[in-house]
Amino acid sequence: MAAEQYSYEPDEIGEWSELKIRIVTKYAQAYSTILANQRYLKHYYIDGFTGGGVALRKITREPVETTAKRILTIEPPFVGYHLIDADAAKASAMRLACAGRVGAQAHCGDANELLPRIFETIRFDKYQRGLCFLDPYKLMLSWDVLQAAAVTRAIEVFLHFPTGDIQRNVLRHDQSTVDPESVARMTAMWGDDSWRQAAYAEEPDLFGTHTVKQPIDSLLVAFTDRLRKVAGFKHVSTPIAMRNKTNAIIYHLIFATPNATGLRIATSILKTESTQKGRPNGNKLY
């Protein structure tokens, strides 16, 4: 179906995005199945960057259902759904997709503003739980969202860590060439400017010391550590690299949860899906 037949401009995605869709949907299926059997619990799905329900494969332009669209069809269903997109046309398309599912709502707005308010409605002491997917296509997520999710003790998060955008636009050897807006976006996602300590180090040379950019692994280790120690998630997965056909890292997928069982299931799915033969990221972590 051609893009002009949609009421919005569909995103174009590569194999790595389809892999991400499979991972999150597979976990959501397991999550809903387990929690639906615990009748005293109510479970919700939250998506901060839903798209319009359909994306298009690069080159072939074949339609692919997005994560939110697939999760709306999962049986047993979630008790409620909050699906957010800043694009009015995409949010409108998701409202139509929600029409057949009880408790499903599509919102148009800034996820950084809406998500903390939604998280406040999911109460651990009221036997409510939530699964949240945060899939910004670049650096546009606020640390406050992650902190708000962790504080609930009731919400698990799949997070798209925008490694490619960070590498291109923030972590340059010469920091004087970095756009201040990109630095501000990085600091907003991190919560403060301590990311610099993980991204750069002072190393000795003949004239004293000089600043050296560190491997991306250093930043990832520091970020997952921050999710645990600062945000307050009890369990955080090893980041899984999502790679394109040339083996370049596009982003990393991270899972954070208050629940040890959730981490075990998510880790199994992440490893199984990301190590299958022919997948763009091969069997490499980080």
Image: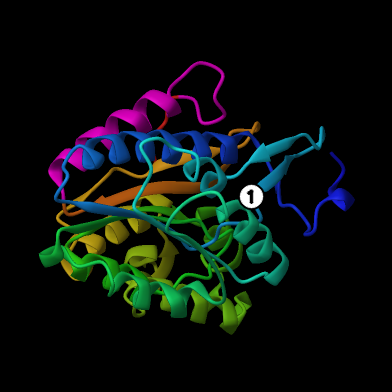
* Vertical placement of residue 141 versus 132, above or below: below
Q: Quadrant of residue 283?
A: top left
Q: Is residue 80 above or below residue 170?
A: above
Q: Which residue is mark 1?
A: 53
122 relative to 16 in the view: left or right:
left
From the image, which quarter does the N terminus lie in? top right
Taking the image as shown, residue 172 lies to the left or right of residue 268, namely: right
The residue under the point 44% across, 76% down is 114
Residue in the picture at 42% in, 30% down: 284
Q: Position of residue 188 (x, y in %)?
A: 43, 78
Q: Residue furthest top?
A: 277
Circle 1 sits in a helix, a strand or a loop, which is it?
loop
Quadrant showing the C terminus = top left
Residue 156 seen anywhere in this rendered image of the structure: no
> What stretch of residues is rendered in magenta?
259-282
Under mark 1, the amino acid is: Gly
